[in-house]
Image: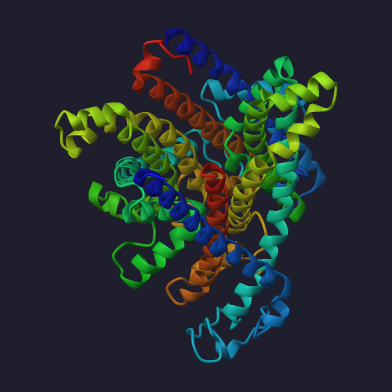
Amino acid sequence: MKGFLLRRAATVPLTLLGVSLLVFAATELVPGDVARTILGREASQASVTALREQLGLDRPWIQRYADWLGGFLTGDWGESYTLGVPVHDLVLDRLGHSLLLAGVAFALLAPVAVGLGLWAGVRHDRAADRVISVGGLAFGAVPEFVTGVILLVVFAVKLRWFPSGAQAPEGSGPLIVLWHLALPALSLVLLCTGYVARHVRAGTVASVESPYARAAELRGLTRGQVVRRHVLRNSTVPAASALGVQLQFLLGGLVSVELLFTYPGIGALLLQAAVDKDLPVLQAAALVLGLLYMVIVLGADVAYRLLDPRVRLGAVTS
Amino acid sequence: MSAADATAVRAVTRTRGRFRVALSVGVALIAAWTVVAALWPALAPYDPEAQDPLARFLAPGGAHLLGTDQFGRDTFSRMLAGARPVLQVAPPATVLGVLLGTAIGLAAGTLGGLVDEIIMRVLDAVAIFPAVIATVLFVALAGRSVTVMVLVIAGAFTPIVARSVRAATLVEREKAYVEAVRLRGGSTVREILPNIGPTVLVEATSRFGDAIFAAATLSFLGLGQPPGSPDWGASVSDNRLWLTVAPWTVLAPALAIASLVVGIALTADALRGRREHA
């Protein structure tokens, strides 16, 4: 276990290097002159050249990459081309909003998906199982912005139960904030529930039909007791790895959900920066999101191993 | 046959029946939208681009089955026309991604050793980079075009396909028939390929659904089909400004996307299930 953790931790700087190179290379591919884009078509060639020098665009790429990565690591992320504010504060502020939305969605997703998966597994091949399986399959296939727009029409426009924007007014209490985040969080939850529930269901079916569950039942335990004491524990292992996978989809879904619900998160920022060709913001936002993904993948991997005593104690190396 | 056997047989028959229903519904939905994509000019009651200032925001019913949008364009006709752009991007992207992924997965699985190790490490590194971020980066920077969409979606799918093809190849490689070919000095790839065909088919169907998902999302984000196009994703994006006035202009393309992707998901699930319960 310790060796595994060390090995995984050692991959972090390597991945950081890879992701940063990829982000930098992608932004290098920008067609056209960035200085020209910022100043507009009317600007004189002299002022374009001056701006190129000011932005350091006339230096070789390897030098700019080293400067950029060094600046990123020391907290100097540069200034936004279009907004004129420090990128560091802007990106971290938007990241905070996104983490709140993703956190609310995840807090909803984990119990709902695991609960539905358990229920479907215990009642497998009955009506409840089929409804959960087909429903999860359908919602998992539909893009989150489609689910989101349908939720908007029904719950914000027709019934007026929820607001159509996800951003609560400045200084709102936590309940008001949650109320604003409910619809965007729900569209992310609907996207991810089916996958997690399917994995929990598979684990549950296997353990309900296992000899130890049958033995427990023969010893006189009720179905509920068997599920609580024996099945639940064994279903959490597939649940952890499935939740880890879906957390990545959930973060990916932030881009379109934040756009749909006009929420000032990092996904919407990334998109806006890409459209405006605001390179410092684009690079920082992409790198921060890439790092976040990496942490989640790593966290899910570790959680998976901690939950399974066979792996934890080194009896099985998976 | 004992009573227990009879119950088991009935359960299997019932499961197969369920997959058959799912498969029929799924294939019917895909077929219906494919026909619409090909023949919409003959099916649409109006020109999807024709504007009518006197007929703006008409509610569904009457002359306009699904109402009209802010330019008085017929929502139903636009929904039918919107099937074409998405079905021009998703199939080539799927085919390209599946071909590349199958080639890489087969190579890794049959060659094994160091080559396999290197290929899998590179795929791991690529897979850790979130597809959405990569997509936004590349489409926004490389410019908006059908070719870029196809390449980006295919690129995102390649590692996924490669991984499952490799896994299937590793299973087949250990079987006696492959050993026999190897002893005879024949091409193992040629023997393995037909036997992993079903895996590739299931994989391709799932990826097709994901390709529709990706193409619609790109257009919704303004990185795919241009605004004003009857494309479903672009329509949802354009019309969401009028959500409170004319919700039908958003619901029609949204439900069109949903019906197509659900159809594909049902098909993929039925194909996978039939394999597992065979």
Among all residues in the image, which is located at the extreme right? B185
Report if residue A47 is visible in the image: no
Between B57 and A242, the residue placed more toward the observer is: A242
Q: How many marks?
A: 0
At x 26%, y 51%, the residue is A172
At x 27%, y 33%, the residue is A232
Among all residues in the image, which is located at the extreme top? A3
Picture layout, residue A63 above or below residue B28: above
Instruction: Find residue B120 and report its horizontal and vertical position in percent.
Output: 66, 24
At x 74%, y 26%, the residue is B178
Picture layout, residue A108 above or below residue B110: below
Q: In which quarter of the image is the N terminus of chain B?
A: top left
Determine which quarter of the picture holds residue A225. Answer: top left
Between B55 and A220, the residue placed more toward the observer is: A220
Instruction: Find residue A228 and report its horizontal and vertical position in percent.
Output: 21, 33
Instruction: Find residue B98 and report its horizontal and vertical position in percent.
Output: 71, 43
Instruction: Find residue A270 and report its horizontal and vertical position in percent.
Output: 56, 44
Report if residue B153 is visible in the image: yes
Among all residues in the image, which is located at the extreme left? A220
Determine which quarter of the picture holds residue B231. Answer: bottom right
Left or right of residue B123: residue A106: left
Q: Quadrant of the C terminus of chain B?
A: top right
Picture layout, residue A60 above or below residue A280: above
Between A23 and A59, the residue placed more toward the observer is: A23
